[in-house]
Amino acid sequence: MPVTERYRPDPRHPELGSLFYDPVPAADFPQHILRFRNDRWAARVGLEALSEAEWIEHFGRFAPLPDNLGEPLALRYHGHQFRVYNPDLGDGRGFLFAQMRDAEDGRLLDLGTKGSGQTPWSRSGDGRLTLKGGVREILATETLEARGVPTSKTFSLIETGEKLYRGDEPSPTRSAVMVRLSHSHIRIGTFQRLRAQEEVEAIRRLVDYCLAVYHPQAADRATIADANDAPALLYEAVVQAVAELGAAWFAAGFVHGVLNTDNIVITGESFDYGPWRFLERYDPHFTAAYFDHGGLYAYGRQAEALHWNLARLAECLLPLTPVERLEPIYQSFSERFDKALVAQTFYRLGLAVKDAEAARTTAHALWAALHETEAPFERVFFDLTGGARPERLAESPLAELYANEPWTSAIEAVRTEAPSPHLQGPAAQAFWAQRAPEDMLIDEVESLWSAIDREDDWAPLEAKVARLREVGAATPPPDGPPDGSPGG
């Protein structure tokens, strides 16, 4: 098999033991039509040399990769769904297929699936994914990556030739199997399952594993006093990562839609995209899921939802460490979120944080203006990037709005900050010479899908992905994107 020297297999998950997974076979699909392969990330993990036939063999038929997992593993977990505990969850239409090291930073990465067939946790589901669902995952992950959000990467999408029936799509609809590249699939719900079953030693084993494999820097920073308190060290690392994720979503104008505990992984990486949306205008009450009638996971409540989920993780750790040890870490979430939101706001504006308090004032002025005026969300960030230069604002369709309060004060604050050095690069200069932002609103999502559904025309989707990657290339922070992903 033509893997490169960058391919570094490291199948670690079986170390946890059979209590954590079920070996399962992949579905046998009638067709395999390759629709999307992420060559950027394939190169990052040493799989870019695969031919189309080899790609389909591994990511459509799921023949094992060299020196990797010998069989797929459906992961076990529980979770709160809209704050109601569900003990019947688990990988119902996916599995862990392979694990390998990121060739650039050494992180352990998973290749996991969606739509790969039934498992012991499918309940009454067919274990399949609609092609539209796969296309939506591509659009979500590519847009989030471009906007600096730590996210899973859509690695592969293969159309499988089955007709599926769904209540939320015109049916029958086309089917697909997707592979995602993700930094861990260990969820808060993974801990919840063990806590519900009173598997205390298994919780301890999972804590040690997560700390060693996914958060080794937390142990490295520990003082002598807390070096032996692994649960608290892990909890603090997860709280920090999840706070940063929530701030990144907020700054990106992203609404995940379903923030159940089984959708929050311990690395704080965004994944599993269902009814997601991006904001057209700042609206804290905007919800993505049509079934979220009470607005539990609305845009402005996502931080609250994440904080609630972190409380559930703390409950799972109480058999191992006292509540007094975890309580101050839990209470620090808001402060961590606020600090991360300032940093992420400055990242999106292409500004360098020189003074923390001044940066906080500037960020708050921007968010207050967005809230009060409900200006087009992505247009504002596009116009103000690099310091709200007068010539850019004069060319904007929002020029008249910017000439009045509260925008005059917000713009004045932005102009006191220093642009990030990376904005001087050729990719950034070329991109910011354009006259319009690269948005991702629901009408465009439906339009891109319509071209595929009606005419099997994939060119608009491919062009959109290319443009989103131009955004990523134009806006990396000085030391690389926040999630460690390549800028272009």
Image (spheres, helix red, strand yellow):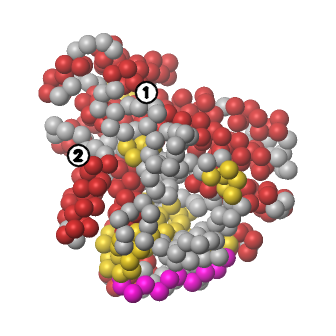
Based on the picture, tell me whether residue 31 belongs to the magenta stretch.
yes
Q: Residue at x 52, y 45 (%)?
A: 292
Q: Which of the 4 image quarters holds residue 364?
A: top left
Q: Is residue 358 above or below residue 301?
A: above
Label drawn at residue 238? none
- x then y, percent, for residue 240: 61, 40
Give the secondary structure at mark 1.
loop
The vertical placement of 278 against 171, above or below, is: above
**Residue beneath label 1, please?**
353
Question: How many angstroms separate mark 2 from mark 1 (CA)?
Answer: 22 Å
User: In this view of the protein, which residue sits in the foreground, 265 or 64?
Assistant: 265
Crowding at dot 2, Cα within 10 Å, few <14 / some 14-19 / many 20+, comes out as some
Relative to 86, is 198 on the left or the right?
A: right
> Where does the magenta region start and end?
22-32
Mark 2 and mark 1 in contact? Answer it, CB < 8 Å: no
Q: Is residue 140 above or below residue 360?
A: below
Magenta stretch: includes residue 174: no
Q: Residue at x 37, y 20 (%)?
A: 372
User: Can residue 426 be seen from the camera position used here?
Assistant: yes
* Residue 427 - label: 2
For the residue labelled by badge 2, is the local secondary structure a helix, a strand or a loop?
helix
* Residue at position x 59%, y 32% in the image: 336
Amino acid type indicated by mark 2: Ala
Q: Nearer the viewer, residue 156 or 204?
A: 156
* Three-letter code, disc 1: Val
- Whichever of labels 2 and 1 marks the residue nearer the N terminus, that label is 1
Please indicate whether residue 251 sits to the left or right of residue 267 in the image: left
Horizontal side, residue 149 vs residue 418: left or right: right
Query: Depth check: 305 or 13 in front?
Result: 305
Quadrant of residue 303 in the image? top right
Q: Nearer the viewer, residue 126 or 139?
A: 126
Q: Is residue 220 visible?
A: no
